[in-house]
Image (tube, coloured by chain):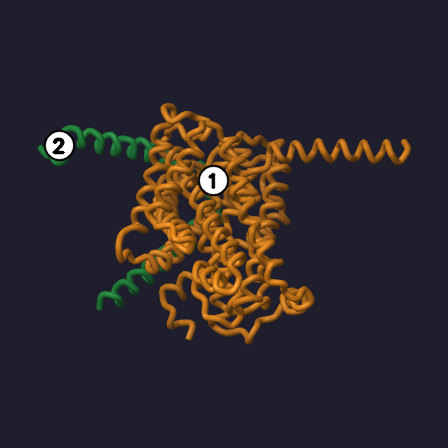
Chain colours: A orange, B green
Amino acid sequence: MDFGSTFFYKYRRFVKALKIYLLLAGPGLIVMLADNDAGGITTYTVTGAKFGYGLIWFLLLLLPVAYVVQEMTVRLGAVTKRGHAEAIFDAFGSFWGWFSFLDLALVNWLTLITEFIGMTAALAIFHVPPIITIIVVSIVMMLMVLQGRYWTWEKIAILFAALNLIYIPAAFLVHPSVSEVISVGLIPHFPGGFNGTLFFFLMANIGTTIAPWMIFFQQSAVVDKGMKEKDIPWGQMDTLIGSAFTVIVAIFLVVVTGTVLYGSEVESAAQAAVIMMGTNPWLGTFIAIGLFDAGFLGAICISLASSWAFGEVFGWAHSLNLKIREAPWFYACYLFALISAGMVVLIPNAPLVLITLFVQVIAVTLLPAALVFLILLLNNEEIMGKYKNTALQNIAGTTIVIAIIVLSTLYGITTLFPELLV
Amino acid sequence: MITIEGIFGTRMGRVIGGWLNKITEINRKYATPRIRMSRSVKIALLFLRLYLVLLIVLLGYKFWTLIK
């Protein structure tokens, strides 16, 4: 074959592969970009303001961490055709099943409140009252699921996920020194020396990378999408691309705040957006839109993770491919989670800071169990057959799971007893 | 005899009774864990139990110091 024919053949193969990927892409991409939720965006904002570019190298390490854990949910979902909640009940019995399910319901509901806090704070910058934000967001989120097709929901969610990339143009607006980003950010070191504050931030960044809802969400999404064993490589690729995007977004946000706010005392992404509005309105607007989108994306995934889990455990119809009359309890759970979490944010003097801290503590009661069950299930030949973990996957998975358990537990404990860091 | 309907009223009692029946049914369905209880599985589950006890003790201690 001449060069032209070879090129055309390769081009056709690439286009075909891209079309298949675009059909099968979704759960991995959405869960990973939703991982940068309101809490995550706040963590990265404060990390950049506190340490400049100094912890970018650490964010790069989070790519394999996120991929290894979430990839296991793809295989488990595709092989068992069951969500994580149902898989735990089935494999480990009702005690661990109820524990995981009730803990998930609680931690998801609390996290949903934090997403609403993020969304209302972001739109408050544009003078939108919180009640309007909550009503409009709840209506849009209900409309997204009520159209009765998983595929449509997924493609709309991907559009919102793409908006998460707004931090990339934001980074270009601040004109960072690329050589400084590379020399300071990519060489592993501990800015200011290894101390309690730095350790807290390392733990916070790990804590925001893997959350319990992500495991439950992706596995249920894989099942609802109808992915089969043959689709696993595409699901893995989707997860890998998603993991790369989540880290890229985090790095660009750290570059933004590391350039503009380095050395400032910033406590939240909303506060950072307000400060930036004063110097560069475009930049402030980008950060605020990004924060809103992060909260929105987190909210749609978290409320769905809960609804899927309720459906799996109680045996109700639970699929986005079903109409409201076919799966009334599934949609009722979704609506109830949204409205109740939104209403908490509207309560005057509600202890929102306490709720935000409480989320981190409650999450560490569930995360180790969810991760350990994941490893045990992936090692069960009866359940997984030829898709069970290989020795290499076990070494990587177990190492990462142990590291996450230790660091997230320390994070939860230091949140509970901040005096330990002094 | 005390019944759920007697405590919550007929309509509400029926709903709560239905829920309790569902929970009993789920407990029965998943009474026996499907996974083989090998040594590694037992160790992992024991670790999780101890871990949860530790966290509950810490949460309890925090709560106690807050109200004290």
Q: Residue at x 29, y 34 (%)?
A: B23
Query: Is A421 rendered above or below residue A380?
Result: below
A311 relative position to A349: left or right: right
Indicate which disc, 1 or 2, sits on the residue closer to the N terminus. 2
Image quarter (top left, top right, bottom left or bottom right) of the N terminus of chain A: top right
Q: Residue at x 85, y 34 (%)?
A: A6
Question: Considering the numbered disc 2 on the image, is that residue within a helix, a strand or a loop?
Answer: loop
Specify whether residue A205 is in view: no
Q: Residue at x 66, y 66 (%)?
A: A177
Q: How many marks?
A: 2
Please state the horizontal and vertical placement of residue A300, each as a whole percent of the image.
44, 41
Q: Which mark is residue A203?
A: none
Query: Is A321 rendered above or below residue A41?
Result: above
Q: Residues within 10 Å of mark 1 (few under 14, many from 20)?
A: few
* Chain assignment, label 2: B
Q: Residue furthest right?
A: A2
Q: Amino acid at mark 1?
A: Arg
Choose mark 1 or mark 2, whichever is in front.
2
Q: CA distance from mark 1 to mark 2?
A: 45 Å
Foreground: A203 or A183? Answer: A183
Foreground: B6 or A326? Answer: A326
Please state the horizontal and vertical placement of residue A340, each as a whole percent of the image.
31, 44
Residue topped by disc 1: B36
A232 relative position to A31: left or right: right
Residue topped by disc 2: B9
Foreground: A230 or B38? Answer: A230
In the picture, residue A137 is in which quadrant? Answer: top left
